[in-house]
Amino acid sequence: MTGLHPTYPLRTERLDLRAHRQDDLDDLLAFHSNPDIVRYVPWPVRDREQTRVALEAKLTQDRLTEEGQWLVLAIELRETGTVIGEVLLKWASEASRQGEIGYALHADYHGKGYASEAAREILRLGFEELGLHRIVAVLDDRNTASAQLLERLGMRREAHLLQALWFKDEWSNELVYALLKDEWLSGRSGSAASDQG
Ligand SMILES: CC(C)(COP(=O)(O)OP(=O)(O)OC[C@H]1O[C@@H](n2cnc3c(N)ncnc32)[C@H](O)[C@@H]1OP(=O)(O)O)[C@@H](O)C(=O)NCCC(=O)NCCS
């Protein structure tokens, strides 16, 4: 495996997934500064300067060259050119071909299937282009919107870990969801059909 060097944008029906740019700052700030959005993600509520620093790091996270790295892509709504969120893929292990996904969207764009659309493309990238065997998602068990998204993607709930993490000043229970490449291949026609329904 030689890592992942996508050609951008990655186009889905309504979205362009692409590397972040300096001029994404205002769009990023709009959701990084919202306490409801960052409640269950591993970042604090950010002001403009903190978002600028976070964006600096994201500018370099547009490829995977070694295990342990995260690919961090902007989700751009093609119709308006607005960055409505971000979607992530971690190359967790090269030898065992393991990955992890993550995502966050501006609240105004929830409930429209955009997160599913972006995450589905990231699963495709992980399985087909990076050659992963298994992709997981790890979340707080109170994050029902995220759990529903993972079930919509066809991911399996594998574990429920009680007080596995000291997170944002309290013990957090973790859910682990996973998908094997074979499961993804056999579920693809079903997910395409439910997209249209
Ligand atoms: C987790 C998160 C990304 C989920 O976003 P979402 O918009 O609910 O997820 P989806 O894109 O799958 O949208 C599904 C909803 O859109 C609706 N929808 C509308 N049009 C649709 C379409 N064309 N296609 C698919 N679904 C559509 C679905 O019916 C569903 O609605 P429902 O939730 O009322 O059942 C969002 O809640 C978020 O950003 N949370 C904060 C960050 C966070 O916690 N990240 C995860 C950390 S583990």
Image: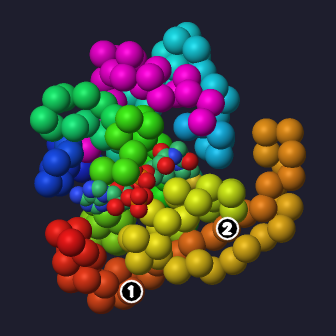
Tell me the amino acid under the disc marked 1: Glu
Q: Residue at x 31, y 63 (%)?
A: 120
Residue 62 x, y percent position in the rendering: 35, 40
Ligand 1 closer than 8 Å to the CB at disc 1?
A: no
146 relative position to 43: left or right: left
Whether residue 180 is in magenta: the answer is no
Q: Crowdedness of circle 1 by 10 Å Cα count: few (<14), some, many (20+)? A: some
158 relative position to 102: left or right: right
Q: Which residues are magenta?
A: 17-36
Which residue in the structure is indicated by mark 2? 175
Query: Residue 113 versus residue 24: which sits nearer the camera?
Result: 113
Q: Residue at x 60, y 36 (%)?
A: 36
Ligand 1 closer than 8 Å to the CB at disc 2?
A: no
- Mark 1 or mark 2: name the one nearer the start of the chain: 2
96 relative position to 120: left or right: right
Query: Residue 92 versus residue 44: which sits nearer the camera?
Result: 44
Residue 126 x, y percent position in the rendering: 36, 64
Q: Can you tell which quarter of the image residue 86 is in?
A: top left
Q: Residue at x 38, y 16 (%)?
A: 26
Query: Residue 30 versus residue 165: which sits nearer the camera?
Result: 30
Q: Quadrant of the N terminus?
A: bottom left
Which residue in the structure is indicated by mark 1? 183
Q: Residue at x 36, y 23 (%)?
A: 27
